[in-house]
Amino acid sequence: MNNDLINKKDIYFPSFSGSNNNLISLLNKTSQIICDWFSNAEKYGPLNFDEEFKCLMPDQNGNSPEDLFSEIEALISNSFNPVHPGSLAHLDPPPLILSILGDLIAAGLNNNLLAYELSPSITHLEESLFKWFSKKIGFSDFSGGIASSGGTLSNLNALIAARNYAGLSSDPNAVFLISEEAHSSFIKFTKIMGLNDNNLIKVRTDNEGCMDLKHLKKIIKECASKNKKIFSIVATLGTTIRGALDPIEGIWDICKKNNIWLHIDGSIGGIFALTNIPINGLKNIHCANSITINPQKILGITKTSSLLLVSNIDDLKNTFSTGLPYISSKNNVIDRGELGLQGSRPAEVIKLWLGLRFLGMTGIEDILKSSINKKVFFEKNLSSKKYEIYSGPLHIITFLPKGMNKMESNSWTQINRNKLLKNNFMLSRPKFKGKYFLRAVMGNYNTSESHIGDLLNILNSTG
Ligand SMILES: Cc1ncc(COP(=O)(O)O)c(C=O)c1O
């Protein structure tokens, strides 16, 4: 047998009795590469992608870890770098250090949140942490939740539960309502849920980007007259383009009167409700039936980390439980795979738990407050004579020179996004109200006021 193969076989899997020295040295080497990449962020900028970059595919004999390390380095050095202070494009902040450790632990444990017998301690952890979240936002003892891979899936779990709760799972007249500034993924749900465009109704927003309650009431009347049955109204707590908050209390009044499930898409803003940061519109979210919160989007819990919390955990169980015929279940413990769409699921909750345990409420508040303060500083100093500016109370701001039409906005945003990238600032370029804009998301803890000052100098002097 060839020697390479013998060496490789030694490190297929962790040893159950030996020293695991091979694994330790590979982990050390990997840590070094990742840390070097962080340390060199300033040199290479937020986006350092070589268009010629290619990955080799698996071959007959496999490769030694030594060979693979050069490929790993190429992959890493061609990645988007969220640690760079100019990374301000999206809701993808730097990874929290304790959360990186959590990911490593989850990979090492390779437990499965499908079932208690495959993840006993972590099943307890997820259940307890989600209860903690539920209590923090004011839900009762009946509440709980389930994690999933991102906000899209959390929202989908919620809407499927809402439709089941309304007894409309196979009714073609079942509809749900969102605001016209809600996230684009809601359009996907109609396809997945066996619905079509007519089953999704968009409510107008006001000048601040918040759901217009008058229009909502009008739609509810129209639905009643056309025999359309509303199974959920979705309020967004932090819209994607400008961080607007829909008026939860007003929407809740309407839901209560009409016996409609209120879902809050708090993928962006929900996490702020854990803190005492004074933001109008974040109180009383406990009136909702369900709420999505995405700690991956601002706290830096590594992807993915998304929670769906429900006021009554039985609503998830009644919707998704099928029984798991190949699993030995335990009395009084719900196998987590019975509470949502996903079956096998990694122990992602570890990185959330470790991150929050490390930060504590003070650390959480510090990160969130700093993002708002940076946005306020940026907004105050971005020329309002020159720019049309859209921004709600959160950390997102979207802008475009005044008076541009669609074509002009298209070229201006392309030219200036590239110009900013050359200066190591990465902003996004969303389409909004029929035009293109630039958008800055101030959720990067590494970005200082002096960095923002440099960004403002470019924007305020740009033609
Ligand atoms: C308001 C809102 N909801 C839902 C989502 C979807 O979240 P994810 O990308 O984690 O699936 C996003 C994504 O940015 C969002 O901004």
Image: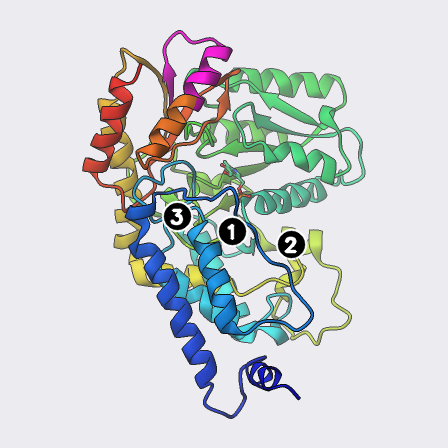
Pointer 3 residue: 81
Question: Is residue 398 visible from the viewing direction of this image?
Answer: no
* Distance Cα–Cα, label 3 vs label 1: 25 Å
Pointer 1 residue: 307
| In-image side of 429 versus 312 (left or right) | left
* Along the viewing direction, whichever of 384 and 216 lies nearer the viewer: 384
Q: At 55% across and 27% down in the image, what residue appears?
A: 254
Question: Which span is picked out in magenta?
Answer: 398-414
Residue 342 is a magenta residue: no
| In-image side of 451 versus 253 (left or right) | left
User: Picture coordinates of residue 291 (x, y %)?
Assistant: 52, 43
| In-image side of 292 versus 392 (left or right) | right
| In-image side of 42 versus 274 (left or right) | left
Q: Amino acid at mark 3?
A: Asn
Q: In the picture, residue 388 is in which quadrant?
A: top left
User: Picture coordinates of residue 123 (x, y %)?
Assistant: 55, 68
N-terminal label among 2 and 1:
1
Q: Amino acid at mark 2?
A: Gly
For label 2, being within 8 Å of ligand 1 is answered no
* Along the viewing direction, whichever of 288 and 7 lies nearer the viewer: 7
Pointer 2 residue: 340
Q: At 32% across and 43% down in the image, what residue appears?
A: 444
Q: At 69% across and 70% down in the image, what residue appears?
A: 60
Circle 2 residues within 10 Å: few <14, some 14–19, many ≥20: many
N-terminal label among 3 and 2:
3
